[in-house]
Amino acid sequence: MPRATWSAFVDRLEMPDLSLSSDEKLTPSRIRIELLAGLTVALALVPEAVAFAFVAGVHPLVGLYAAFLVGLVTALIGGRPGMISGATGALAVVMVALVAQHGVEYLFATVVLMGILQVIAGVMQWGKFIRLVPHPVMLGFVNGLAIVIFLAQLGQFKVPGSMQQTGHGMGGGEWLSGLPLYMMLGLTALTMAIIWVMPRLSKAVPAPLVGIFVVAALVIAFGLDVPRVGDLASIQGGLPAFHIPMVPLTFETLEIILPYAIILAAIGLIESLLTLNLVGDMTGKRGGASQECIAQGAANVLTGFFGGMGGCAMIGQSMINVKSGARTRIAGIAAALFLLIFILFAAPLIELIPLAALVGVMFMVVIGTFAWNSLTILRKVPRMDAFVILLVTAVTVYEDLAVAVVVGVIVSALAYAWNNARRIHAKTRESHTDLGAKVYEIQGPLFFGSAEGFSELFTIEDDPDVVIVDFAESRVVDQSALQAIEAVAGKYEAAGKTIKLRHLSRDCHRLLNKAGHLMVDSEDDPDYAIAVDYNVRTGILGSH
């Protein structure tokens, strides 16, 4: 690509705000906070990556490699410092059918194609369409995801090893009972209490990290028999090795992996961009959607070639990171590198950490993520908005995130269109300039939803010979609106009467001219300093 063209492309990208605020400057204190936040996130990533690998039906290291590679790349070049990415349950539930039918090599090929599609989305700047997600959908998203995170942790209250034996991830196995259950609940509650109290005593060390270390120390010191990270699976391994997916390079292979790649790319981008907005609200940053799409795509292409299951932004770990004080890219990079260190050198030590401590951390994330204020505003907001919040929450829990967001946006759009369709109306008066003429002052947008209502505004048989339709308080939006204008004009012409259109804004002129229906003056003043008349019977255009 020529240098000038590449520069123009970069200038058009919706780049993130990279300026550092006072609490983001790289002082020794800031670096310490970032590193400790990264360590906390890395510890929380281990059981999640292992569990999601079981859900997808692949080896735990496939999930851990994805968490490392996706987390590292997105931390380096992602659209929002503070975000954490890795293997996620939303993607794992889609992958399980592919792995079961065609094997893990097809999964790696799918992840590569998924990444390519995400890069294309970033280059095309499709990430900006996340702005179309209404606030009620965002509330439903965070509430549903909080519930999903909570439900995912319940799998840790099962007999150690049961997930591997059943092959159904967190959905199978026997529940703990008796003393083991009470100890698990007690340690979880202790972790949550430490996380709640610690910020009131000191903020030198992230509260989740203190909770994990204190509970782990108690369990190890007293030799308590409770589920630990090592009970899920061994996380010991080597460096991820470059590996070209062993699949036939045929059209048949593309037919197999393309549908999965499209679904995974869509789910990954939707979850990542919504997390981007959520983290942006917490840190006061904006922009970076296109950059995040490219980063997610590049990360998935890389992880597909290094034996990882792919991933996207993780809202739970992102919340841990931000609430631990992280504000720069250092924390995300540190989290990925700490995870690699765990895999290479510290697996025996990490496997001793009780699952109760990590569950307690995630339960606090659930409490912090759930939009509790949405429960109080349900009775205050419009009923349709309340319905959308509940609908998106339910679909997120029972289906998946991408479907929930799409459903929420569609329902919100239909509700908006219906409300605007009912706004079309007209005031009538006698013309001050054309004696005997009747003026219809149209108010409200004219589009496909209001086109029929627009046609019903006119009393053609009772109107005088000259009718003026004034659009000063209206907007002609689409082809349906143009057709509605033509239909009304045709009826007046058939009745032997004259209709004139006035005060069409410049964008309306472009629509009318482009459609070839009504030739109007493209130089009409958008501030309505002049008016344009179109005489349907004579075809004469005049201004005054």
Image: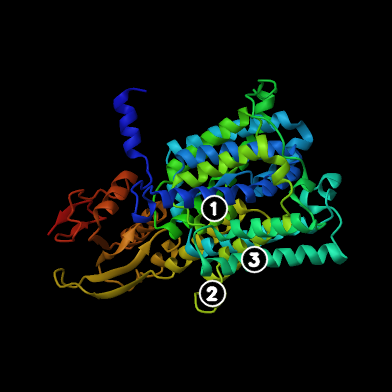
The residue identified by callout 1 is: 318
Residue 397's spot in the image, x, y percent? Answer: 67, 59
Q: Is residue 246 above or below residue 511?
A: above
Q: Quadrant of the N terminus?
A: top left
Closer to the chain start, of discs 1 and 2, is 1
Indicate the amino acid at tag 1.
Ser
Indicate the amino acid at tag 2.
Arg
Q: Nearer the viewer, mark 1 or mark 3?
A: 3
Q: Quadrant of the C terminus?
A: bottom left
- Viewer-side residue, 392 vs 175: 175
Q: Mark 2 Cα within 10 Å, few/some/many (few <14, many 20+)?
A: few
Q: Is residue 116 above or below residue 315?
A: above
Residue at position x 43%, y 42% in the image: 290
- Viewer-side residue, 30 vs 469: 30
Tell me the quarter of the picture where residue 426 sits. Answer: bottom left
- Say which element carries label 2: helix
- Viewer-side residue, 470 vs 295: 295
Residue 365's spot in the image, x, y percent? Answer: 60, 61
Residue at the limit of the structure toward the top, as seen here: 249
Residue at position x 86%, y 64% in the image: 177
Q: Mark 3 Cα within 10 Å, few/some/many (few <14, many 20+)?
A: many
Q: CA distance from mark 1 to mark 3?
A: 18 Å
Tell me the tag on residue 383: 2
Tell me the tag on residue 200: none
Asked if residue 94 shows in the view, the reply is yes
Tell me the quarter of the picture where residue 116 sits. Answer: top right
Closer to the chain start, of discs 1 and 3, is 3
The residue identified by callout 3 is: 192
Number of callouts: 3
- Say which element carries label 1: helix
